[in-house]
Image (tube, rainbow, N blue to C red):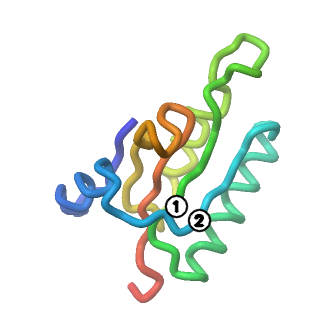
Amino acid sequence: MLYSRPGVPTAALRKLRRGGWVIRGELDLHGHTGDEARMAVAAFLNRCMLEDRRCVRIIHGKGHGSKNRLPVLKNKVRHWLMQREDVLAFCQARTVDGGAGAVIVLLKSSSR
């Protein structure tokens, strides 16, 4: 899972993938339904923008507790992030940061 908006330098994306940004916030979506998760993600990112948190982690889970043992929220979170203008890039978290169960998001600076 890797995404960046056009114009985002590859160096910034590389830094994100390698864990070079300090994670300034976290949202854990375990136990949320799709609608609850969508609202939680929007509220979380809005709050992060107000507080000028540039790099955050969203834990969507790996799906082990879901009905079919498949990640339910993973693709939904990816889709929601791509729709937001304030999201510059995102990638799957490094293993130490949650691996396939989490995504690291780089947000625009609120001063932009």
Q: Position of residue 25 (x, y in %)?
A: 59, 65
Q: In the image, is 35 to the left or to the right of 47?
A: right
Relative to 100, residue 97 above or below: below
Q: Which residue is mark 1?
A: 56
* Residue 25 tag number: 2
Q: CA distance from mark 1 to mark 2?
A: 5 Å
Q: Secondary structure at mark 1?
A: strand
Q: Quadrant of the C terminus?
A: bottom left
- Name the residue nearer the viewer: 112 or 60: 60
Relative to 65, residue 36 above or below: below
- Name the residue nearer the viewer: 32 or 84: 32
Q: Position of residue 13 (x, y in %)?
A: 27, 54
Dot 2 amino acid type:
Gly
Q: Quadrant of residue 71?
A: top right
Q: Residues within 10 Å of mark 2 (few under 14, many from 20)?
A: some
Residue sitting at x 50%, y 31%: 100
Q: In the image, is 13 to the left or to the right of 110?
A: left
Q: Quadrant of residue 11?
A: bottom left
User: Does the CB distance between marks 1 and 2 fall below 8 Å?
Assistant: yes
Relative to 93, residue 108 above or below: below
Q: Secondary structure at mark 2?
A: loop
Residue sitting at x 69%, y 20%: 64
- Mark closer to the chain start, 1 or 2: 2
Residue sitting at x 42%, y 88%: 111
Q: Residues within 10 Å of mark 1 (few under 14, many from 20)?
A: many
Q: Position of residue 36 (x, y in %)?
A: 81, 47
Q: Position of residue 91 (x, y in %)?
A: 39, 45
Dot 1 amino acid type:
Val
* Residue 28 tag number: none
